[in-house]
Image (cartoon, grey):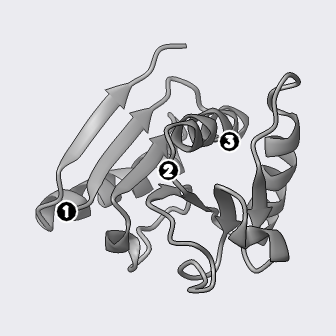
Amino acid sequence: MTQVDFYILPDTTLEARLGFACRLAETIARKGFRLHLHAEDEAMAADLDERLWIFRPDAYLPHALAGSEMAREVPVVIGWQGPPDPAEEHPQALLNLHPEIPEWFSRFERVAEIINQHQEVLVAKRACWQTYKQRGYPVKAHQLRS
């Protein structure tokens, strides 16, 4: 059964949320998981693509946008529309930055959700938490400090 982890940030900004998403993506990939990073829209996906190039000056996290040639070869694929392309190697983890739960989330071993203290994010992710719990998925919260 899919394990769901919520990471709760003390910050209110999108900047902090996306910065943490980059660090979490690196951690997930370092543990050997293939990751599908699910953005809210194409603009957020492009932003994440840029951030993953520069978030650590001393390292590079191989990644690509969904649908690109490189998506088959890298551990992190950034998408925003639908489930991962069947041609891509099967990702084991989903990092969901979309306000809603994708209907195809249960194909992943692990799902990560990031909450910050922005009111819209709080409302959306509370609803996600309740949905996962109502469906019987194991959910764990990780309260992060600044």
Q: Amino acid type of disc 2? A: Phe
Point out which mark residue 18 bears: 3
> Residue 66 lies in what quarter of the image?
bottom right
So how many labels did they put on this image?
A: 3
Within 10 angstroms of label 1, few (less than 14), some, or many (20 or more) residues? Answer: few
According to the picture, the residue beneath numbered tag 2 turns out to be 33
Q: Is residue 12 above or below residue 84?
A: above
Q: Amino acid at mark 1?
A: Met
The residue closer to the viewer here, 57 or 31, is: 31
Residue 15 vs 121, above or below: the answer is above
User: What is the distance, in whole Å, between disc 3 and disc 1 at their CAs?
Assistant: 27 Å
Image quarter for residue 21? top right
Task: Specify whether 130 is left or right of 4.
Answer: left
Identify the residue at horizontal 50%, vertical 34% (top origin).
117
Q: Mark 3 vs mark 1: which is more N-terminal? A: 1
Asked which secondary structure carries label 1, the reply is loop
Residue in view at x 35 percent, y 73 percent: 107
